[in-house]
Image (tube, rainbow, N blue to C red):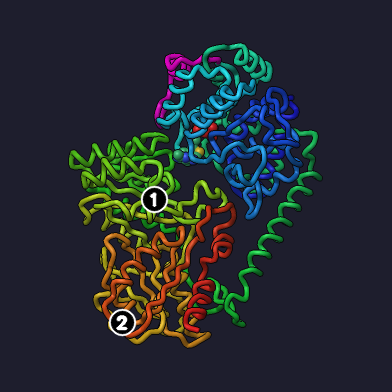
């Protein structure tokens, strides 16, 4: 079994390498447990994945998907070689496990802290059905910081679920560093014991101890069992072991991959096998990429490519909008009222730029661990006492997980809490649907007292972050993206919180930004355009590109409206577009309608009726996201300038 675990590590590593992203650290620390679980302990029926008497397994930390995938393959659910399509567009091996795309996956995971409760439910169902099958839940030690884990732990013991066996992969590291520094969870065994669990502590890499623990768990009656496995993050590759950076990173080149594989020393994953696997990964990528592109090509017939930086003129620089947020924090962080709160996603969202070059600000930085609900509560407390707390994490976890705290504690009390919703839209790419925030505009807009900013590029993000933090007295949510997106504004571009910008294409220039004129909506005079595109966030550059295409290809004059402040809305700019133009396309990198229906609702209040009002919406068509490269996904979800332009032509006939 030890050898099988090494083979599984090797396959997982090659798949992560082929994807260019993924999570080797936690997958490797849990791999010995995974091998024992799938090859020895569990009773499964791969040919009948939903067989009622099967044992159930939930990888609550969905980022350990590579371990789960090779585990299921080892158990015979599918060919091990196929796992190499991990994280690629269209693959069943999504960045985080998806139960509707891959048989053997009990429940989709990726938002930490939710697996144990599901395990409790499955344990109860099995008991109701008088079925002897067991439920296994694999969790991380950082994950223990989520309050929902403890709600589930309490209920499992309360229901005396002896068919439930949980495993904590106690590798001592999470993203922001060592668990004991980020938010200590120890003494973990005593905590579970006091919650009424049977606790077994083992060396999580010792096969004998793992199998012994399973046996002891099966023999334990009247209470659930937790196996706390002391493990090493990155186990099996010396340069990955105990190094936080390998939490979510692929080997950088073939040389590094080979060095890691040499240490893993799998007899099965030979050099030739690696070549074969990488080749099939490339083939998948080329085949899917071609389908996506050909599906997309011809949307608007043109000889010329208008894609970013593909021509000699109209060049843009790219920068992720999150960088603008970081620059704002650095700039205004001297204000003693400002505090930042980390929830184990700090460096990548640039919230650490606040203190990076200013160590004296460190006393105003608070790490709450992976506990988004508590982050909002603590922020509320700080705000009550006159501080300006800035919270931040991935948009999904910043808006969805603590929504009730944001609603009732923060917005109802109009507390001065700022929320940085990072990695908004599809730009988190290969992590897949669980991490792609496509609903936050709806979630935040609907809250009274909330202010909502969706800036279009990194320059505007810097300005709108400063406005949201210092000029707004009350809750504010800023949505920004992970991927580098075109820079379409500069210091000379007007910016006013709550006032939209009107953007007009003038003529092609060497630099994209110079081809457009931008004015505050309050200063703009109707030029008799035939189409309006109202957009927010990185859809603004796409709308600008569409305006350029439409003018050059069809002579259509377009008014692009950059609605960087979504709440409070610049209603006058929308009504003017409805009255003066009447044909409107809304564009959002979000579930379609979240932004579009808000705009449509305002447009419908226009008073002038000399022409029909026609509104079409561009956005993600009421479906969850997908793993893939961000630009691939833009095409897949039909969010590009080409899609907007085609819609415009269709509308104008
Ligand atoms: C609710 C939620 N918040 C944040 C994240 C982002 N995230 C993914 S993995 C991770 C760290 C997990 O640490 P741990 O549970 O110790 O796992 P391991 O170190 O074993 O990989 C975080 C914060 C998430 N997936 N879900």
Is 192 inside the magenta-drawn segment?
yes
Q: Is residue 597 above or below residue 267?
A: below
- As drawn, is 163 to the left or to the right of 143? right
Specify whether residue 80 is in view: yes
Seen as rendered, the residue at the extreme left is 386
- As drawn, is 202 to the left or to the right of 397? right
Which quadrant of the structure image shows residue 221?
top right
Q: For numbered disc 1, what is the local secondary structure? A: strand
Is 16 inside the magenta-drawn segment?
no
- As drawn, is 315 to the left or to the right of 384? right
Closest to the observer, 33 or 619: 619
Q: For numbered disc 2, what is the local secondary structure? A: loop
Seen as rendered, the residue at the extreme front is 129
Other residues around mark 2 within 10 Å, as few (<14) / some (14–19) / many (≥20): few
Picture residue at 63% right of the left edge, 45% below the top: 251
Closest to the observer, 592 or 179: 592
Mark whose residue sits in front, 2 or 1: 2
Residue 409 location in percent, x, y?
26, 40
Residue 141 location in percent, x, y?
49, 28
Residue 5 location in percent, x, y?
71, 29
Which quadrant of the structure image shows residue 451?
bottom left
Residue that mark 1 sits on: 421
Other residues around mark 1 within 10 Å, as few (<14) / some (14–19) / many (≥20): many
Picture residue at 28% right of the left edge, 81% below the top: 608
- As drawn, is 331 to the left or to the right of 508? left
Q: Which residues are magenta?
A: 180-200
């Amino acid at each position: 079994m030890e050898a099988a675990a090494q083979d599984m590590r090797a396959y997982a590593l090659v798949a992560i390498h082929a994807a260019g992203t993924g999570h080797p650290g936690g997958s490797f620390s849990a791999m010995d447990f995974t091998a024992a679980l799938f090859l020895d302990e569990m009773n499964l029926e791969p040919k009948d994945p939903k067989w009622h008497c099967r044992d159930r397994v939930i990888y609550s930390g969905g980022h350990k998907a590579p371990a789960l995938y090779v585990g299921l393959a080892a158990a015979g659910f599918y060919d091990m070689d196929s796992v190499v399509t991990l994280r690629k567009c269209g693959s069943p091996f999504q960045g985080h496990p998806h139960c509707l795309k891959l048989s053997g996956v009990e429940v989709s995971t990726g938002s930490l802290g939710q697996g144990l409760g599901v395990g409790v439910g499955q344990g109860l169902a099995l008991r109701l059905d008088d079925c002897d099958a067991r439920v296994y839940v694999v969790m991380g030690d950082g994950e223990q910081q989520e309050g929902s884990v403890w709600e589930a732990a309490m209920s499992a013991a309360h229901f005396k679920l002896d068919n439930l066996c949980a495993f904590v992969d106690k590798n001592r590291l999470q993203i922001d560093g060592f668990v004991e520094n980020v938010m200590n969870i120890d003494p973990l065994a005593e905590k579970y014991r006091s919650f009424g669990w049977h606790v077994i502590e083992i060396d999580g890499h010792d096969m004998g101890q793992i199998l012994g623990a399973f046996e002891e768990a099966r023999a334990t009656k009247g209470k659930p069992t937790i196996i706390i496995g002391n493990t090493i993050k990155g186990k099996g590759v010396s340069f990955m072991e105990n190094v936080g950076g390998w939490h979510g990173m692929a080997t950088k080149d073939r040389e590094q991959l080979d060095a890691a594989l040499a240490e893993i020393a799998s007899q099965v994953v030979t050099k030739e096998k690696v070549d074969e696997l990488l080749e099939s990964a490339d083939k998948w990528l080329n085949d899917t990429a071609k389908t996506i592109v050909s599906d997309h090509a011809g949307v608007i017939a043109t000889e010329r490519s208008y894609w970013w930086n593909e021509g000699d003129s109209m060049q843009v620089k790219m920068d992720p909008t999150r960088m603008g947020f970081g620059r704002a924090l650095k700039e205004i962080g001297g204000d003693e009222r400002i505090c930042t709160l980390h929830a184990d996603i700090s460096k990548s969202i640039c919230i650490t730029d606040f203190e990076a070059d200013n160590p004296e600000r460190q006393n105003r930085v608070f790490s709450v661990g992976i506990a988004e609900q508590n982050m909002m509560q603590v922020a509320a407390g700080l705000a009550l006492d006159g501080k300006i707390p800035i919270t931040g994490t991935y948009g999904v976890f910043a808006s969805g997980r603590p929504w009730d705290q944001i609603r009732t504690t923060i917005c109802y009390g109009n507390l001065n809490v700022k929320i940085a919703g990072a990695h908004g839209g599809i730009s988190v790419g290969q992590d897949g649907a669980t991490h792609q925030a496509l609903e936050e505009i709806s979630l935040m807009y609907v809250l009274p007292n909330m202010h909502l900013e969706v800036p279009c590029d990194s320059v505007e993000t810097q300005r709108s972050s400063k406005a949201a933090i210092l000029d707004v007295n009350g809750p504010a949510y800023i949505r920004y993206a992970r991927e580098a997106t075109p820079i379409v504004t500069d210091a000379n571009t007007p910016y006013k919180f709550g006032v939209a910008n009107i953007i007009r294409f003038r003529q092609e220039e060497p630099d994209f930004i110079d081809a457009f004129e931008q004015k505050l909506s309050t200063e703009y005079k109707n030029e008799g355009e035939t189409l309006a595109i109202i957009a927010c966030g990185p859809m603004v550059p796409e709308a600008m590109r569409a305006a350029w295409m439409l003018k050059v290809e069809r002579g259509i004059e377009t008014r692009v409206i950059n609605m960087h402040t979504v709440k409070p809305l610049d209603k006058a700019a929308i009504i003017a577009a409805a009255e003066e133009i009447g044909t409107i396309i809304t564009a959002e990198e979000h579930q379609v309608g979240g932004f579009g229906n808000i705009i449509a609702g305002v447009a419908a209040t226009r008073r002038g009726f000399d022409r029909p009002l026609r509104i079409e919406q561009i956005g993600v068509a009421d479906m969850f996201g997908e793993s893939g490269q961000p630009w691939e996904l833009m095409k897949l979800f039909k969010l590009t300038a080409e899609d907007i332009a085609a819609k415009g032509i269709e509308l104008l006939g």
